[in-house]
Amino acid sequence: MISLLYACLFVVHPIHLSVSEINYSEKDKALQITSRIFSG
């Protein structure tokens, strides 16, 4: 019964995940920020 409730919650409520990466380029003296956002 509880697993059925969790399955319904996953269908109703989407899951979001984000990954961020920050790099500093010594050559260019620039900060590079990349963010990837996934939803399902």
Image: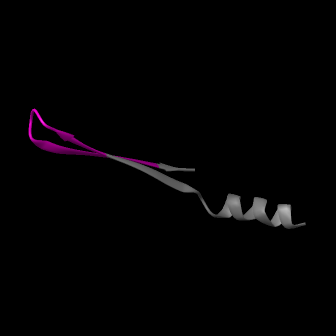
Nearest the viewer among 37 and 28 is 28
Nearest the viewer among 29 and 9 is 29
Query: Residue 26: horizontal and vertical position, in percent?
Result: 13, 37
**Residue at horizontal 71%, vertical 65%?**
9
Q: Over which residues does the magenta segment extend?
A: 22-37
Total label count? 0
Work out whether 12 lies above or below 23. below
Is the magenta region chiefly helix, strand or loop?
Answer: strand
User: Which of the 4 image quadrants contains residue 5?
Assistant: bottom right
**Residue at horizontal 10%, vertical 32%?**
27
Query: Residue 29: horizontal and vertical position, in percent?
Result: 9, 41
Query: Residue 17: horizontal and vertical position, in percent?
Result: 50, 53
Q: Is residue 34 left or right of residue 14?
A: left
**Residue at horizontal 77%, vertical 59%?**
7
Q: Is residue 34 magenta?
A: yes
Image quarter of the N terminus: bottom right
